[in-house]
Every structure is written in C-alpha cells, then in structure tokens.
Amino acid sequence: MALPRLFLQGARYGNLTTIRSSGDRFTRSKWDAFLYASRLASALGIWPWADVFMSTERDTVLIATLSGGMVGDGDKIGAENKENLLRAVRLDGVIIKPDTPRCRSTPSDLPRSVKGRECRCATS
C-alpha cells in the first residue's frame, strides 16, 4: 500500500488517475485499511484500487469494484469465476464503477473502539 506521503505527492500530478490503496493480495483482513486509505485517495481526487484477489471471493470482488479503480483478479487462466467477474465488468470489458469510491462512512462501519463517536464522510 502507498504511504500517505505518496498519496499527497501524487495529488500534485494532473495525470495521476489511480493509486493502490491496499496491501498485497487483497483479502477480507485488508478491507478496513483499504477503505480508510481509499477515503484519503478520494479526497485528493485519485481513484483507489485494490491489489489482486481471487474471483471466487465474491465479497472481495464487490469491495474492489466499489472502490472505483481498476479491477484485477489473480486467478489462473481458466480458473476464473465468470459469474462473479461479470458483477464487476460488463460483457464489453467496461468496469462497472460508482460515481465516488466506497469509504467507511456510517457508525456501523466503525471499529468497536470508536463506536458512539460521530462519523462523517465528505463527498464531492
């Protein structure tokens, strides 16, 4: 995952469109850090994207797609889960993207240690 200084540096370049906001091999255990880092990327006008994942991991495919960035599975050729991938990509190859990246934005999204505090997610 890119360091915060790299996010800030990237914001200086008008041609930067995406930044990897997850650690290697995107799995459920990395969703929290990814969603928080995605918020930083989005605030800087950069689309976040997740590292590779297996297309059999339906929820991970969904989270990666909702990031709004690139979508890349790490399956062996012929081992792809076509049904799950077609939830993220149209038949013509265009990624189905939200208007803004998904981020942690509601109290139910917060870890237990900060429950009870108000959470806000800025949108543009």
Image (tube, rainbow, N blue to C red):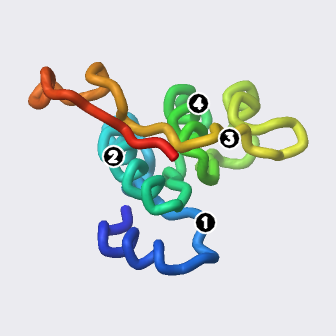
Q: CA distance from mark 3 to mark 1?
A: 14 Å
The kind of residue on which mark 4 rests is Thr
- Residue receiving disc 2: 36
The mark that comes first in sequence, 2 or 1, is: 1
- Disc 2 from disc 1: Cα separation: 18 Å
Determine whether label 2 and label 4 are within 8 Å by CB: no
Labelled disc at residue 51: none
Q: Marks 4 and 3: which is nearer the front?
A: 3
Vertical comparison of 72 with 18: above or below = above
What residue is disc 1 on? 17
Secondary structure category for the residue under label 1 = loop
Q: Secondary structure at mark 2?
A: helix
Tell me the distance, in whole angstroms, between the alpha carbons under discs 3 and 2.
Answer: 19 Å
Q: Residue at x 48, y 79 (%)?
A: 12
Classed neighbour count for the residue bearing mark 3: other residues with Cα under 10 Å, few (<14), some (14–19), many (≥20): some
Q: Secondary structure at mark 4?
A: loop
Q: Amino acid at mark 2?
A: Tyr
- The quarter of the picture where residue 31 lies is top left
Left or right: where does residue 32 sit relative to residue 16? left
- Mark 3: which amino acid? Lys
- Disc 3, SS: loop
Question: In the rendering, at what x and y percent does residue 53 appear?
Answer: 53, 44
Which residue matches tag 4? 56
| Rendered position, 116 above or below 25 | above
Q: Residue tagged by mark 3?
A: 97
Please, what is the three-letter code of the amino acid marked with disc 1? Thr
Q: Verify CB contact (< 8 Å) between mark 3 and mark 2.
A: no
